[in-house]
Amino acid sequence: MARRTYRQQRSVERQDSGAPTVNRQTGRFTYDGTVGRLSGKASYKLDSKTSISAQLGGGGGHDIVTDKVNYLAVTPDFSPFSEHRRLSSVASFVTGELNLDHAGAREGEALNAAVQFYTNPGVHDVTNARFSDGRRYRIDLQKPSTSIDMQIDWKHPMAPGQILSMGSAWHLDDTTQHYRFISNDSTGSFGSDMNDAYDARSGTFSAYASFQQTFGSLTIAPGLRGEVNRRRISSHGADDIRINRANFFPSFHASYKLNKQLQFGASFSKRIDRVPLEYLRPYGTVEDAYTLFEGNPHLKDQSTNAYEASVQFRPGKVEAGATVYLRETRQLWSKNYLVNAAGTSVYNYVNSGNSWNSGAQFDLSFPIVPRLKASTSANLFNERTPIDTTDGRGTQRTFRYSTNATFEWNGKDRGSVPGDVAQLQWSYNSPSREYQIRKSSWFDLSASYTHSLDRTLSLSGTFRYSGRTNQRLIAPSVEEISSRQRTPEVQLKLQKTL
């Protein structure tokens, strides 16, 4: 279960260039979910060097999400109303995995192959929204999906200090959606009734190789990965979207071990994020009374060049580390908001440009007193990101930081019964900026305690509190200031090992 309250103020400029229309929203979001799972696993040793394992599982669940919102007038030209929106989602899933592990004749030589699949044969979402002014709408969405992963890796030691690693992988995403929207709204704020569907498939084949060479205390490992990605999206009444792209991704890793306590590292890698099929959907969907989501069939993948250097220091029970990095992301994905003629916010994802992110991460772990250990981490970010302003697109430089800390106490074992464990965790993020959105700082605090009743039975209690999150959207013709607060959460877990 989850509970969250939120507030939002929305200002929309009228097309006649008069004073903006302003309203305030107060809402309460609730989530309740029930899920059941069953899985089994079997393994078999074919011979002294070869083993095979298989796993199969499945289950289903029912989620209910409810939003109760009051829309209050700030300017006299807004008519107040209330909304009750309920999403009922029923889903089933089946998952499976097959693994083959074979040790070669040479020490360290290994061949590993794996096939994994995950399918949601039935996902049915139904949203019903009712408004105090008599309006209502209903969304009926069915979206079965399947993903398959196949991978084979071969590690081959060559001369002393040399290891050749090669492999290939194939990944498939397949989804079908049937979307039906009906409403009795005559103002047009929700758009027209719709009965649409689309089929989408994305397949990626990759081949990769790396070579590790050791020179005394220095180890280097250059690598190269090639990928071919093909996507197809079909929708009634629209031309098929076909995307065929091939990319190469070089990498380089190096490490130098000065002694048992001190080690240095450096790396370069080029990565890519494939556009989720949901973002390419060729039609729009209603999210709430004032928000519509539009797919962008022209959205391109975003890629990142990452350079890193690190040092690790382990004197005794103390562990310390530092990493500095530079990351350049091209074709960055960003949410882009506009306002249509009915005054509704319409957003999609666009490639907003390139971003540069340099920074550092510092980690420290040390014992405070016997049985009490602390771990802390601090991240510094110096970002240069594309932004959208009233004067057009530009670039903004931002410095921000985040911190987290964990304190863990381990009690003495009571014979064969494990000792109690207590943990306190804290995290904090400073304000940030994303294209049209400004986010304030936020923090998260949790405390947990685990008591073992006997060797195989334990009871855990966890308390979590999240601070209020605030954000401000400034886009053409619309400004939204929102605040969200999640209610404190208490979780009890009884675990039995058979």
Image (tube, grey):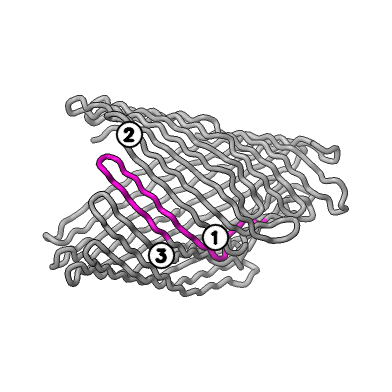
Pointer 1 local density, CA inside 10 Å: few below 14, some 14–19, many at least 20:
some
- Residue for point 37% across, 33% down: 407
Q: Is residue 56 visible?
A: yes
Disc marking residue 356: 1
Percent x, y of residue 91: 47, 47
Disc marking residue 314: none
As rendered, which of 322 and 375 lies closer to the eye? 322
Asked whether the beta carbons under mark 3 and mark 1 sit within 8 Å of each other, the answer is no
- Residue for point 40% across, 31% down: 424
Q: Is residue 68 visible?
A: no
For the record, the magenta segment spans 308-336
Percent x, y of residue 184: 74, 47
Pointer 3 local density, CA inside 10 Å: few below 14, some 14–19, many at least 20:
some
As rendered, which of 68 and 224 lies closer to the eye? 224
| C-alpha span from label 3 to label 1 | 15 Å
Going by the numbered disc 1, the residue's amino acid type is Trp
| C-alpha span from label 3 to label 2 | 33 Å
Going by the numbered disc 2, the residue's amino acid type is Lys
Asked whether the beta carbons under mark 2 and mark 1 sit within 8 Å of each other, the answer is no
Going by the numbered disc 3, the residue's amino acid type is Phe
Percent x, y of residue 268: 41, 65
Q: Secondary structure at mark 3?
A: strand
Which residue bears the numbered disc 2? 373
Q: In the rendered image, which quarter contains the C terminus? A: top left
As rendered, which of 228 and 328 lies closer to the eye? 328
Disc marking residue 268: 3
Circle count: 3
Q: Is residue 393 left or right of residue 423?
A: right
Q: Secondary structure at mark 2?
A: strand
- Precedes in sequence: disc 2 or disc 1: 1
Q: Is residue 204 left or right of residue 19?
A: left
- Residue for point 29% across, 60% down: 256
